[in-house]
Amino acid sequence: MKPKILKKILPQSYTMNTAQKPMHSGEIYHLWDALTASYRVINIAETYQMNTQDQEVHLFLKGLVQGTLLLRIPRLENLLKDAGFAVPPRPASKTLQGKPGVGQEVKLTDEEVLKVMLTLAHSLLILDARGVGTATTNQAIREVFIDLLKKTIMAHDILMKLGTGRQAFNPSPPATASPGALNLGEVYWLFDHLGYRHSTIVLLETYFTNSNDAELKKVLNHGLQKVALPQLQNIETLLKNEGFTVPARPVTRTKQLPAGRTGKIILRDSEILSVVITATQVMLDIHTNSLGSTYRADMRELIKGFIFDEIEYLTMLINLGGKRNLMEYPPNVTAKV
């Protein structure tokens, strides 16, 4: 089914009347970045599709190209066009240049194909997650990026499973001698996440104590009790099960001072919300980046859970900020006169 026909059937998937509610510069940038990255994916995937003689790898690459052309590129192109921006031409197909498995003068092994595709999928993960974090003025645009991120994670999962089964990748050495142990990179990510959780808990508890706003305190407490502390517990448990000692948790600060005071410096509710949103955006970016280099299945599932917990919490924060007019948006832009 052609994208033009799909647009008639599902118009809301491709147009959002952005002229009536212009996107800000960051949203446009990430739509553009995601589109041009998708073009590169097709260009490289078709090149490798024509080089591989492995039927399973060939089918994966063909499916990736078709899925990108059908499900990803039309949405991004039409959102930009609807806002009045001209999009670059799509890359010419490389599948007409010869027969699959023949390719050009430069030959690639199937393992090299899988490694490069994993790198590209990792890049798309990061781009899509940054799009989710950047889309703060338009929930519909954020939903586009969330959906793209879900599809990219699915493709990354398939590619990771395919390449791992063929021992095509080169993960870092195992962290312990136990069978199926986490590798050194995975242990590093877990300890890195642990440190960020400690900082997040300190931040949320401090701001919870500083605020007298009941609704803001409810959102901050949700972030503490439903996101940060459960994630910390999961990380600690995984590390302990692997035989590692975890550092002590930070001392609680929720009862150190009367409500509304953190000391000499008093923060406005808008400042609190701004910092928490920024911290959540950073954590979303960090977790998505770590997923790109995580191999063990249970840890991948753990990180994916973190990602979507943070997306849900980010939506809560943005909705509250919009409701209270506390958000500081980048400049709105439009190409329409």
Image: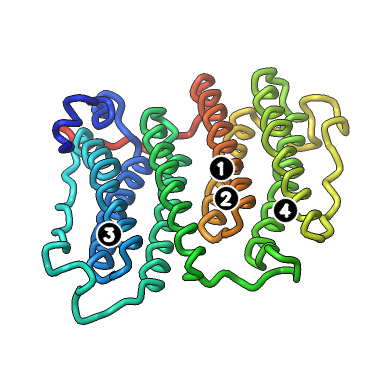
- CA gap, disc 2 and disc 4: 13 Å
Q: Nearer the viewer, mark 2 or mark 4?
A: 2
| Residue 309 against residue 21 in the figure, above or below | below
- Residue 287 is labelled as 2
Looking at the rendering, in which quadrant would you find the N terminus?
top left
Looking at the rendering, in which quadrant would you find the C terminus?
top left
Q: Earlier in the sequence, mark 2 or mark 1?
A: 2
Q: Report the amino acid beneath label 1.
A: Ile
Helix, strand or loop under label 3:
helix
Q: Nearer the viewer, mark 4 or mark 3?
A: 3
- According to the picture, the residue beneath numbered tag 3 turns out to be 40
Quick one: 317 or 145, which is closer to the camera?
Answer: 145
In contact (CB < 8 Å): disc 2 and disc 4: no
Residue in view at x 19 percent, y 38 percent:
81
- According to the picture, the residue beneath numbered tag 4 turns out to be 195
* Image position of 313 (left or right of 58): right
